Amino acid sequence: MTGFTLVRQIKARPAIVFEALTTADGIAAWWGPDALPVVSAQIDARVGGAYRVHFHSAGGGDHEAVGEILEIDPPTRLVMTYSYAFGGEPIEVGRTSRIQIDLKPIAGGVELTFNHTGLANAASVASHTGGWTGAFDKLVRMFGESAG
Amino acid sequence: MVNYQTADLDRVFSALVDPTRRAILARLEAEESLSIGALAEPFAIKLPAVMKHLDVLGQAGLITRCKHGRTVDVRLAPAPLREAVDWLARYQRFWSPALDRLAAYAEAKEEQVRAAEAKEAGE
C-alpha cells in the first residue's frame, strides 16, 4: 500500500476510542500536528458524510482538512478521504488521499492501526501496480537514518 | 535543503515502483560506481532495457552518468531519495503526535467512565 502505517495501543474500550475519532468534540481534542487548540471540527459520521477540521500548526499555519466518510463500522473501522480546503503542505494542494483506521480489541484496551495512503499521484499509481511497500522499506533502509 | 517540486517527487516515486530499478539503486548503493555493462550483468534483460531503466532513474535525478573513454560510469545521487523519505516522514510527524493525544484523550475518558461505573455499582 502507498504511504505509511502507525500503530498505538490505547488503554480504553473500543467504543470510547471510536467516539474520539467520529465526534466533533473528540476530534477537537486531538487533531493536528501540534498541541494547539483546534479552531473548529465538524463531522457527519455516516457513509457519504463530510468532515471538516480547521486547525493551526506551530509557526502560524492555518489549515482546514476536509473529507468524506467512505466506510464507518463502529467500533472497528473508519475510512475517509483526506484533502485540504486551505493550508496543508504545498505539495498536497489539490490531492486527495485516504485514511483508514482499524481498531482491534486487546487485553486492557484497543490497538489502533492508522493507515494514510495515496499521498501522491505517482505513489497512488504505485499502490495499484504493487511494489510500493518494498520501495519505501528500501528507502528507509538506505536513507531513513541519514535523512533524519 | 533543496525543495523538490511535486513533479520531481512524482518522478522519484514512479522510478521506484519498478523492482529492476530498485535493484539497480541497491547495487549502486553498495558499490558506489559501476559501468553500465557491470550493472546490466545480473539482470535477465537486454542492455537496451537496462538503458531505458537508467534513463528513468536519470530523469528522476536518482543517478548520474559519467563517460570515461568507452565506458559510462553510473553513480547513485542520494538527494532525491532523501527528499522522498523526508516528505513521507513529514506526514508521520503530523499524525504521530496527534495519535498520542488521541490515546491520552481516550484513556482519560475511559477512567471517567470507570469511575462513574464504580460509583454506580457502589450505590
Image: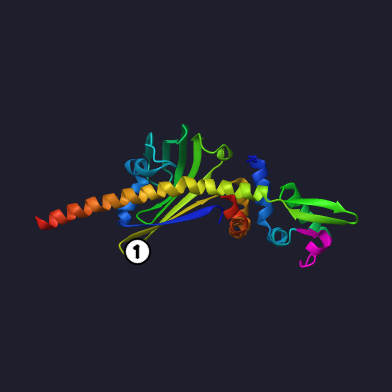
- Please state the horizontal and vertical placement of residue A135, each as a whole percent of the image: 62, 57
Q: Secondary structure at mark 1?
A: strand
- Residue at 30%, 57% in the rendered image: A13
Estimate how packed mark 1 is, as few (under 14), some (14 to 19) or many (20 or more) residues with alpha carbons within 10 Å: some
Q: Amino acid at mark 1?
A: Ile
- Residue at 66%, 54% in the rendered image: B16
> Which quadrant is the N terminus of chain A positioned in?
bottom right
Against A59, residue B119 (above or below) is below
Can residue A119 be seen here? no
The magenta stretch spans residue B36: yes
Q: Chain of mark 1?
A: A
Task: Give the total number of marks visible in the rendering.
Answer: 1
The way the protein has been coloured in the rendering is: rainbow
Can residue B37 be seen here? yes
- Residue at 38%, 46% in the rendered image: A46
Q: Is residue B29 left or right of residue B95?
A: right
The stretch of residues the image draws in magenta is B33-47
